Amino acid sequence: MKEQNDRLEELPEALVAADHPGFSFVWLVPLVALIIGIVLIYKEYSSLGPSVEIRFQSAEGIEPNKTEIKYRDAVIGKVKNLQFTDDLSHVMVEAQLNKDMESLLSSDTRFWVVRPRIGATGASGISTLFSGVYIAVDPGEAGAYTQQFVGLEEPPKILSDARGSSFRLRAKSLGSISIGSPVYHRQIQVGEVTGYRLVPEQDYVALDVFINEPANKLVRRNTRFWNVSGMDVEVTGGGVKVEMESLTSLLAGGVAFDSALTLGDDQPAAEGTEFQLYESREESQKKVVQLSLPYILYFDDSVRGLSVGASVEFRGIPVGKVLDISLEESIDDGLVRIAVLVGLEPDLVPFESLDPGLDEEERKAFFHSTLEKLVAKGLRARLITGNLLSGQLIVDMDFDKEAEMASIDYSGKYPVLPTTTGSLTSITNSLVAILGKLKRLPLDEMGEHFLKVSEGMDALVNSEGLLDSVKSLSLVLDHADQILSIVGDKTTPMLDEMARLSTDARKMVQQAEKMLQQLEKSASDQGSMGGELINTMRELAAAARAVRGVADYLERHPEALLQGKAR
């Protein structure tokens, strides 16, 4: 124990410094590291933009901290986390965007996953085979700011900055048209189909199409759209005719449009205007009929040859169809009359004063009012022959200047239009009138008189006096032939002599013309004979006056011839 204490005493003792330095440089290194760490953390968080949540049905190909978010192929963020929704039906993708990306976020912003896609209209996203999928963003227009979005399962066909116009098409069936199918104008692609949906309430398919600038200005109110999917094959006497818009439309379907030069409304169509999609170009060239107004026509003529579906025309232009033909009992007189129900189609008539913005009821009222004015001016319906070979009748509407005043009768179930007799009936009535007049003629007496006249003519022809007259006439004709032959023999020398006389006369006329020209020069005021003739004429005028004075004196004093002039 003693030894242990001795050893402890031998240990050195610590010396306490009188002046303590206060801070050791050893702590400077971790302090600098801490400051650098704080700066880096601040820089990292200050460079971060907003975080967003995007809901997708599937997270195929998306990896946290690897999958990027791009706008116009520029990286603007990265996926940070993946998690399921509460019902496990979707995947929530948490992504961090770069700084200053708040302007891209609005309620109209769209996100979708870019993957390799191959379709009939082409391939897209091929580069992701090597770099992996990424999430693309399309900023929408000004909208409410939000950080929660529902991702698209398919890439949008039209981006928010695309320039053009969207239109809607109505079709009976979709056919082979799909999203992305091209839209053509004169076989040049100017747009594409952006969507389609079934409208069960009205049983038709609605398609959305987008037309790029400047082709969107070619879409007018009278533009017609038609389906160009597949190919049209027509066999004629000249061979087989095959029409196909393009190879793409053959595989993926397509739509074409054109605006024909017509008298209709050709103003540019507003965005969102709805058009009918026809099955072919031929169908699109027919006029659209969306409204048919029923009217009744009562005819006194026979309707043999008139059938349901026959055309109703105005001066050769179709304006409707025959819907039904039946017999009705007249309330006024109880007689049976023929009733023809027709459907007039206002869409076939280009009314200049019709406002295209009117609804169906307003269009009906406009057409009824216009028709009333036309009936007051003499518009009438009648039956005419549409085909001379088959005898088919049609209903023709035209103005009758001799028609009596009439108006449309709205008292029944359908309005009643006034009618007039047809041209064939008028001809038949005229023939009946002529036959009636012929029937009233005294045909028996006229026949007896004609028989007597015929007997008298027969007696005259077979009489001996007529035979002698014919013989005498024959002799006269023989003498006339002899005289003509004699005259003909002497005519030739006379013609030769006349030719010589005409030649001499022509020479004399030429000489006379020369003499007259010479006399004209001499008799002029400057000619030698002209002055003498003027003097001579003056002297003759003075002599004539003197003779006239003597004649007047002798007329008053005839005795002066015997006694001389009294002094």
Image (spheres, grey):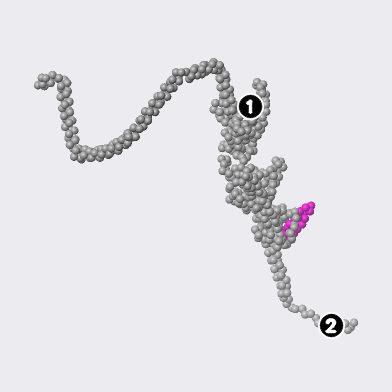
Q: CA distance from mark 1 to mark 2?
A: 153 Å
Residue 313 percent coordinates (x, y): 60, 34
Q: Determine if the magenta segment contains residue 83.
A: yes
Name the residue type under label 2: Glu
Residue farthest right in this picture? 1
The percent coordinates of residue 342 (x first, y second) are: 64, 32
Nearer the N terminus, badge 1 or badge 2? 2
Q: Is residue 343 above or below residue 562?
A: below
User: Dot 1, crowdedness within 10 Å: few (<14), some or many (≥20)?
Assistant: few
Labels 1 and 2 touching (C-beta < 8 A)? no
Residue found at x 20% / y 37%: 530
Residue drawn where x is 71% and y is 45% of the image? 198
Q: Kindly identify which residue carries mark 2.
A: 9
Dot 1: what SS?
Answer: loop
Label 2, secondary structure: give it: helix
Locate residue 552: give its quadrant: top left
**Residue 375 visible (yes or no):** no
Image quarter in which the C terminus is found: top left
Q: Residue at x 62, y 26 (%)?
A: 301
What's under tag 1, amino acid-wise?
Ser
Q: Quadrant of residue 13?
A: bottom right
Q: Which residue is mark 1?
A: 302
Image quadrant containing the N terminus: bottom right
Nearest to the observer: residue 363 or residue 524: 524
Q: Start and end of the magenta stretch?
A: 77-97
